[in-house]
Structures are given as structure tokens and as C-alpha cells.
Image (spheres, rainbow, N blue to C red):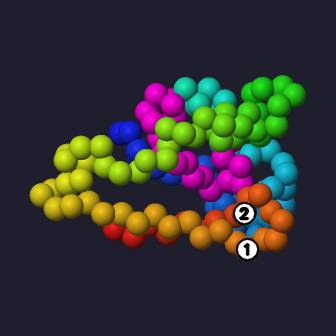
Amino acid sequence: MRSGDIVLIRTGQIAQVRARGSWGEFDSGPAPGLGVGAAHWFAANEIAALATDTWGAEVLPNDTPGVFQPLHLILLVNDDHRRDLRPRSARDRVRGGRPLRVLLHRAAAAITGAVGSPVNPLAIF
């Protein structure tokens, strides 16, 4: 991983939903994901963004009693190092002698009054 990279994590939760044929407790029950300890790794590696196939990205029940989604809170509050997505060096701009260009688009649903939204990310190389 390098500074400015985007991390995509597949937990398998969406595959479970599809296999079951029901959303069940997808948005409110136990979920696989990252623990609060991952915050140190994200900060040390200057990760630009995180996306998972879960609704909240972190393990539920979480590992911090009395705090709902602590990793979410830490990453949202401390995201100023994740704003600049430009390549950091000439090496980052070139792979195999050709420029590496990736468009990662995350279209959010228009939900009036919402502060967040499910997204449907699309990576185009």
C-alpha cells in the first residue's frame, strides 16, 4: 500500500445475502468487518478511502463497548490526510511504461435529508 491508495475489502457479506435470498439483518445485525485497531494502519499508510461490501465497514458487535462504530468515527474525524488523491511520485504515475489512470466513481443515492447513502462504486481502468 502507498499513500493515497484506496482500500477495497470484500468480507463476503453480500455473497451471504445473495445465497440466503434475503437481506435479513444486513443493516442491523452482526457483521464482519474491521476493528477499531485498523485506524492506526489507515493513518500510518495514509489511505485515501475505504470501501467494503458491508453497510458500515466495521465488525459488529464492535470491540469498543458503549461506542457504536468507533472506527467509523475515528476515520471520519481524522480524514484530512485523505483528501489529496494525486500521485505522490513519477513512479506512481506510471506502471509498465504507461500512465496508470483509474476512475473510481461512487454515485450516491439522492435521499432527501440524509447524511449518507449507499453507493454503487465503479472502477474504470
Task: Report, in whole angstroms, how far the alpha carbon at label 1 lies from the one at label 2.
Answer: 8 Å
Residue type pointed to by label 1 = Ala
Q: Is residue 14 visible?
A: yes
Q: Quadrant of residue 33?
A: top right
Residue 113 in the image: above or below residue 7: below
> What quarter of the picture does the C terminus occupy?
bottom left
Question: Which residue was labeled with disc 1?
Answer: 110
Residue 95 x, y percent position in the rendering: 20, 55
Q: Is residue 5 left or right of residue 24?
A: left
- Of labels 1 and 2, earlier in sequence is 1
Count the marks. Answer: 2
Where residue 72 sits: x, y (%)?
Answer: 69, 40
Residue 3 lies in what quarter of the image? top left
Whole-percent x, y for residue 24 in the image = 84, 61
Query: With respect to residue 60, does 65 lie above or below?
Result: above
Q: Residue at x 30, y 43 (%)?
A: 88
Q: Give the residue type that dot 2 points to.
A: Ser
Residue 25 disc label? none
The spot of residue 15 in percent (x, y) is 64, 61
Kindly check if marks 1 and 2 are in contact, taking CB atoms under 8 A apart as contact: yes
Q: Secondary structure at mark 1?
A: loop
Q: Secondary structure at mark 2?
A: loop
> Dot 1, crowdedness within 10 Å: few (<14), some or many (≥20)?
few
Say which residue label 2 marks: 117
Left or right position of 54 against 115: left
Q: Which residues are magenta?
A: 41-58
Whether the magenta-drawn stretch holds residue 47 is answered as: yes
The quarter of the image holding the N terminus is top left
* Residue shown at 60% from the left, 35% from the top: 78
How many other residues sit within 10 Å of disc 2, few (<14), some (14-19) or many (≥20)? few
Asked whether residue 33 is drawn in magenta, I would say no
